[in-house]
Image: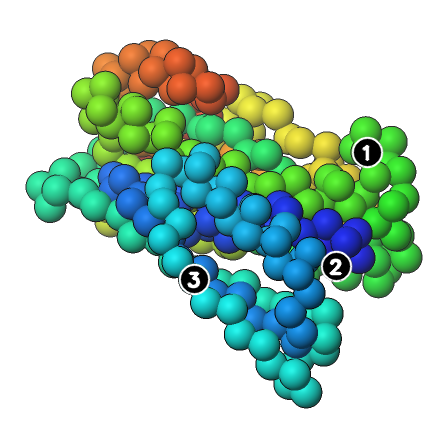
Amino acid sequence: IAQQMDKHDTIGIDLVAMCVNDVVVSGAKPLFFLDYIACGSLIEDVMVDIVKGLAEGCRQADCSLVGGETAEHPNVMAPDDYDIAGFAVGVVDLEKIINGKTIAPGDVIIGLPSSGIHSNGYSMVRKLFFDMKKCGVADRIDELGSDLGSALLTPTRIYTRSIIDCISSGVELKGLVHITGGGFYENIPRILPDNVAVTIDLSSFELPPIFRLIRKEGGVSDREMYTTFNMGIGMMIFVDRSQADRAVEQLKQSGESPRIIGSAIDLAGDR
């Protein structure tokens, strides 16, 4: 999609976001990021825009872009093809690692809105819009209020500042879930103790237009949607009910729009 639009300054943000959002769920503060860019031929303007995105992602995450590697692969990759990868390193005291072990029935789940599709589910997105519907990236979509390509390239939201600020304020975060590939159904269970499940109130948060459009145009079931996409919630935070209001207020001060979207429930050992 970035190549079709000749717009390459957002995907670096996505790359950083996928790494630092995964790091922060353990309570770790991201320290630095390194990237690797492989290309068929080094096209300077494209590379500059990619690195601009990487730098912007690191700025948003309060971490340093300390280095990287660029490799040309002529005759292996097409001249205008490229692939980017990277990793982040963070730090957290051993006794302060957040791992979900203390999550208990009655705990509240706070959801932080996503900025859009983030970086998962694009195989379905491309098949639906470009293969089945024969759309172009420049097509204006009234439901989205923009052209299709711009909506699909909206960068992933980076939550690290908000989460670290919340931890620093003294709120005890029992568990954090970064909603990526696998959506609600596959990501939430990873953090739960064996005797705990969750209930999510789908009316408690707004479904962004892009997901409504995918569901309608593709005839995609709710189960499949919530297994593939973040559906408008990019990060979930588990806190004791007594600390929920304090956590919500702190997250608002950090620029988030938190919503209480559900709670942990007793599974009675029958998982």
Q: Is residue 91 visible?
A: yes
- Find numbered disc 1 in the image and state the secondary structure of the residue it sits on: strand
Mark nearer the viewer, 2 or 1: 2
Instruction: Tell me where residue 104 sits by quadrant.
Output: top left
Q: Nearer the viewer, residue 235 or 206?
A: 235
Q: Residues within 10 Å of mark 2 (few under 14, many from 20)?
A: few
Residue at horizontal 69 percent and vertical 56 percent from the top: 45
Judged left or right of residue 247, residue 159 is right
Q: Residue flagged by tag 1: what amino acid is it?
A: Ser
Number of numbered tags placed on the structure image:
3
Q: Nearer the viewer, residue 64 or 247?
A: 64
What label does residue 68 carry, if any? Answer: 3
What label does residue 3 carry, if any? Answer: 2
Tag 1 residue: 146
Label 1 and label 3: CA atoms lie apart by 34 Å
Residue at horizontal 60 percent and vertical 81 percent from the top: 73
Disc with the residue nearer the chain's start (2 vs 3): 2
Residue at horizontal 29 percent and vertical 30 percent from the top: 164
- Find numbered disc 2 in the image and state the secondary structure of the residue it sits on: helix
Q: Residue flagged by tag 2: what amino acid is it?
A: Gln
Q: Can you name the residue that lies furthest to the left here?
A: 95
- Find numbered disc 3 in the image and state the secondary structure of the residue it sits on: strand
Give how far across and how far down residue 215 sits, in percent.
73, 44
Mark nearer the viewer, 2 or 3: 3
Give how far across and how far down residue 236 sits, in percent.
40, 34
- Above-or-below relation of 180 to 56: below
Label 2 and label 3: CA atoms lie apart by 22 Å
Q: Residues within 10 Å of mark 3 (few under 14, many from 20)?
A: few
Q: Nearer the viewer, residue 70 or 248?
A: 70
Give how far across and how far down residue 77 sits, in percent.
66, 80
Q: Residue flagged by tag 3: what amino acid is it?
A: Gly
